[in-house]
Image (cartoon, coloured by chain):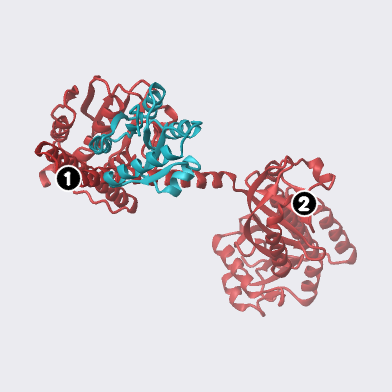
Chain colours: A cyan, B red
Amino acid sequence: VASDGKEKRVLIVEDDRAVRRILSVTLSRAGFSTVEADSGREALAEIDKAPFGAVLLDLGLPDGLGGAVLKRLQASPDGRPVWMIVSALDEDDAVRRYGPLKGIFVPKPFDPWDLVKRLERLIESHHEDGP
Amino acid sequence: VRGKRPVVDRSLQAILRTLGDIGHTLESLSEPEQRIRHWLQLIRRIIPYDGCVLLEVRSERAADFRFISEPPQNGSPALKEALASSLALISLENIAVLSNETAPRLAADLPWASYLGLPLVANDRIVGLLFLGSAEEESYDEQEIALLSIVSSSLASYLGLLHAHEMEHLAKRLFDSSLIGMTDTKGQYIVAANDAFLQMVGYTREDIERGSLDEKAMTPPEYADLDKKALRELEERGECTPYEKEYIRKDGSRVMTLNGAARTQEEPLRFVCFVMDLTERKRAEADLERLRSEFLSVVSHELKTPLTAIKGSAAMGLSAEPPSQTEARELFEVINEQAERLRELVGNLLDATRIEAGTLAVNPTPEDISDIVRTAVDTFGHAWQERPVQLSLPELPPVMADRRRIHQVVSNLLSNAMKASPGREPIVVTVAAEDGRAVVRVKDSGQGIPKDKLPLLFHKFSQVHESGGRGTGLGLVISKGIVAAHGGSIWAESDGEGRGATFSFTLPIVLPQDAQAG
């Protein structure tokens, strides 16, 4: 399916070292390759650098650029990469703060295996629907 | 001295002349006290007395009296008290001339053998009491009482005018004050308003004269019912319960106000309306609400992030593919570390709650402050290796300190200093004795604090650097609470952004006698 391997590249945007590490290890075990960003600024730079199959985005970043990263993702014309929003807020509070959210919302704390399964399904369904 | 009753000329001519003179005396409202004194002197020509006192009732409710006596030295405090108490003997419904016969008890308190007390009434209120006293017994007869009644009516009117004038002045002063918006409203039209109100709604005096200030038109439709209810209350009770409403300003924007009104005329309805601008208060409420919600989301983040790490580590440890021994160790380390983070956060939340409720208990004992600071820095060293900390910890007299709590404050200030200056610049920690207090200072050369944010630092819900490091912002709130509970103070100084900051706090030094006792 993922001929060029980019579908298997996941960008993890999360400021907390421990959470980032867990996501990275879980995704690696599931066969993904990961790139980590601990700020919005870094995430935007990575997105510009090379294509990703998926992005895991924690909205509440200390540089306040979580919303900007989300905007960039939502603006993508072909809907790629797919993304999931990870947040310590309830979805209602997150909407109040960041506006309407497109994408799958995963509240913290989450089960990392469960999250990876959902991510796999998301990539798959997007691939089927895609051009 | 028993005075001989002077002989007075009580011919019609003499009476008329006196009436004319006393009329002239009360022609102006300026210098009323002198005019009244002169009046008192003039009536002596036709009604003799040894002493005369006017008790002017400026406000019966507030017991606000003015005494004018003739001769002037006639007004001892005891006499004034006796005269004021005589007000209880009369009422509007029962206007009686007081005398030795009608009020013998009062007579005992007065310095005269016989007296007359004549109530003065104007505008349906008792405006004063005029007392004449004589050293002779049974000095005043029916004729003199009648004569006094006639002449004193001019004084009563004068006091009534004086009072009305004062009330007018008071009302004008109130109306013109900029403290509160006021309007004089007839039906639905504002016929007069003070500057405070005009500023609030953006209209001018000319607009009032043009009749543009129409309460109904100035009120957004959603407040029409509240206005109607207020009008009903005004009609029924003469007053309305204060309520919040909005006005549409001349430029179309809206202003939130608190309104109350009192009726001044029944038919057609006219009332004075008191209007308070609530814009600032509403803004402050909204700010607080925003800060509260911000704080909740920060706390939520701080609680859920470690939980996520713990849950994730556990899930990985339990997965079908068991972790290696090294991996397992790493997972447990994460769990341990994150549980510690949670413990600290929950501790901080509890401390902040105790401080807010005023139930934070400290047990200060004489302690060596330098030693507390050294221990805190040493403990901190494990977490922040390689950070140079410059210490100046001289030997000082003991301070009163709860060792554990002051340690917490120092750790907190160190932690902030480290976070604020992520480079290798040294943190400078000093202890000194100044003005009978010990002062601890923690100085960093980091990002600094803008001047206008300095006072906000120690407030709940405030984080000065929105994009700065994570944290609930509770550390300084707790530190302040702890220092305050010790009777000390805490403050921050900074020369501005990028120029570092110094946080200082003080603790009381133990006085020698306390040290011996302790």
Q: Residue at x 90, y 63 (%)?
A: B13
Tell which circle, 2 or 1, labels the residue nearer the N-terminal end.
2
Left or right: residue B518 versus residue B314 is: left
Residue at image mark 1: B317
Q: Residue at x 60, y 59 (%)?
A: B75
Q: Position of residue A114 (x, y in %)?
A: 29, 47
Q: Position of residue B464 (x, y in %)?
A: 39, 33
The Cα–Cα distance between marks 2 and 1, rounded to whole angstroms, is 71 Å
In the displayed orientation, state which residue is furthest to the right: B13
Left or right: residue B254 versus residue B190 is: left
Q: Label 2's element? A: helix
Tell me: residue B428, above or below residue B137: above
Towards the viewer: B194 or B251: B251
Tell me the quarter of the image containing the N terminus of chain B. bottom right
Residue at image mark 2: B217
Q: Is residue A108 visible?
A: yes
- The chain that hosts pointer 1 is B
Q: Quadrant of residue A4?
A: top left
Q: Position of residue B150 (x, y in %)?
A: 82, 68
Left or right: residue B24 versus residue A102 is: right
Q: Residue at x 57, y 71 (%)?
A: B109
- Amino acid type at circle 1 is Gly
Disc 2 and disc 1 in contact, CB within 8 angstroms: no
- Amino acid type at circle 2 is Ala
Q: Position of residue B443 (x, y in %)?
A: 27, 25
Left or right: residue B120 versus residue B403 is: right
Towards the viewer: A113 or B196: A113
Check disc 1: other Cα within 10 Å, few if <14, some if 14-19, many if 20+: some
